[in-house]
Image (tube, helix red, strand yellow):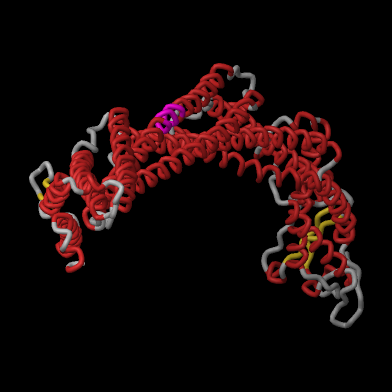
Amino acid sequence: MLQNVVPAEVSLVCVVKPDEFWDKKVTHFCFWKEKDRLGFEVILVSANKLTRYIEPCQLTEDFGGSLTYDHMDWLNKRLVFEKFTKESTSLLDELALINNGSDKGNQQEKERSVDLNFLPSVDPETVLQTGHELLSELQQRRFNGSDGGVSWSPMDDELLAQPQVMKLLDSLREQYTRYQEVCRQRSKRTQLEEIQQKVMQVVNWLEGPGSEQLRAQWGIGDSIRASQALQQKHEEIESQHSEWFAVYVELNQQIAALLNAGDEEDLVELKSLQQQLSDVCYRQASQLEFRQNLLQAALEFHGVAQDLSQQLDGLLGMLCVDVAPADGASIQQTLKLLEEKLKSVDVGLQGLREKGQGLLDQISNQASWAYGKDVTIENKENVDHIQGVMEDMQLRKQRCEDMVDVRRLKMLQMVQLFKCEEDAAQAVEWLSELLDALLKTHTRLGDDAQETKVLLEKHRKFVDVAQSTYDYGRQLLQATVVLCQSLRCTSRSSGDTLPRLNRVWKQFTVASEERVHRLEMAIAFHSNAEKILQDCPEEPEAINDEEQFDEVEAVGKSLLDRLTVPVVYPDGTEQYFGSPSDMASTAEYIRDRMKLVSLKRQQLRHPEMMTTES
């Protein structure tokens, strides 16, 4: 053991024996025989004789010296020193290997991932801390004094250990600093590789499955339900893209952080990754937005088309139902409703054209998102569908407009029919009023021939008015017949108005003829009576004609008899002219005239009576 651990400078080794050892039998150790082999002399000596070979100041108190020394402390420090030396030396070798390998194979390190062999076997921070603590202990021992306050020098091995520890610490710090830089570079490279891997994952998915999903979705649907189904499918695609867009946002933040703190050699690569990722994501996001806008426009287009179709169906249903309005007000209301519905259809068709044109414009821009795919066939199908819907709606609207024109003409004819029937009924009322006026107010027969002639002339004019009224009513009723034939409906005038008109006219005709007969008889009566009553000496033979007197009396009696006879209508009903008092007054006047004629006749027969009864 001494040969292994004691330096070669040692020339003498003193083996101290306890005092009890000397009380025993003296034993001779032949260490001197081993001097040549060992390289130093070994002697066996007692403690009290140890000062013969070693100065007391170099001996500890255990051997009667004055040297301050704590062997356990020295031993602990020595163990710490040896452990530090061993660990630091091993760590330096590992760090040197790592650092030198990183310098030589920097390019290769960029292409491989970090493995477990890259890490040193011990923690450099722990070794450095141990070294600093050891160096601090060694430096403090130089200034520690004995109990008496006298300073002493540390052991030679301790003095030699300080520069060795310092040198190891310097080397460790240098290599550890390089190692930290290597770790930082490798960590950055690892992070960069992870980012690059994730970027390629995002790019490959967006340009692969993501683009394939969008390539397969080009239709717009042929109805609201189909467009909604496509929208739902698109929302599922957007949901899948959202997950990758979230990864893009995270990667973009990481790349931005690396760009702010990165080295010049990494800036170009990072910017290239960032630009590639941004281009792909923005292109894909724009395609998704374009598709969403296209489907929304298609949904609005089909919604407007469905509303317009329902409006056209409602208008067509209204036109297909044959209506029979009760009066002109109902017809006007129906016409107003038709005009409102037609106007609503016009507005709906205009909205459909606007939506369709907007959708066509969007489809025309669809080729820019085709990613090399020929979308001519898909676009042609969409364009043909849109144009077909708009043309179909235009044709349906045109058919409805034609039917509205027919219905409007029919309604106007019905208005004319109602007007004709109303005017015809009014003509009947007017003719009834004329008949009533004829019977109630046209009762006078005149006081003389001249007045009676005037009354006859007025009566003829009155009859002309009645005739015009009757003819007007007949024309209106004939017009209703024509309108009913045009409208293909049952003649409404034959049921009530025409029989009433004919009946009133016949009654008027009968009453008018009776009135004419009475006036004519009155004229004859008044004319003959006036001839008799007038004093005409130049024609005495005429006055003296008895036949004239007989004729006047006969006409007068006939006229009186006629005044008492009612007018008999064709249906057997009877009606008198005027009131009984009117007829009595007229009859009284005629009787008075007849009395005058009779008196005149008597005078002519008996002239002597002229003076007496004058």
Frontmost residue, 402 versus 176: 402
- 247, above or below 76, in the image: above
Q: Position of residue 610 (x, y in %)?
A: 19, 63
Q: Quadrant of residue 425?
A: top left
Labels in figure, total? 0
Q: Position of residue 150 (x, y in %)?
A: 91, 79
Frontmost residue, 200 versus 426: 426
Q: Quadrant of residue 157?
A: bottom right
Quadrant containing the C terminus is bottom left
Q: Where are the magenta residues, as a range?
A: 398-405
Is residue 579 something that shows in the picture? Answer: no
Tell whether 53 sits left or right of 248. right
Frontmost residue, 11 versus 452: 452
Tell whether 533 sits left or right of 58. left
Mostly what secondary structure, the magenta segment?
helix
381 magenta-colored = no
Q: Position of residue 285 (x, y in %)?
A: 63, 37
Q: Residue furthest bottom?
A: 148
Q: Residue at x 75, y 67 (%)?
A: 73
Q: Quadrant of residue 357?
A: top right
399 magenta-colored = yes
Q: Residue at x 55, y 19 (%)?
A: 380
Q: Position of residue 443 (x, y in %)?
A: 23, 56
Q: Residue furthest front?
A: 608
Tell whether 158 sits left or right of 596. right
Q: Residue at x 71, y 63 (%)?
A: 26
- 171, above or below 471, in the image: below
Is residue 45 something that shows in the picture? Answer: yes
Frontmost residue, 78 versus 293: 293
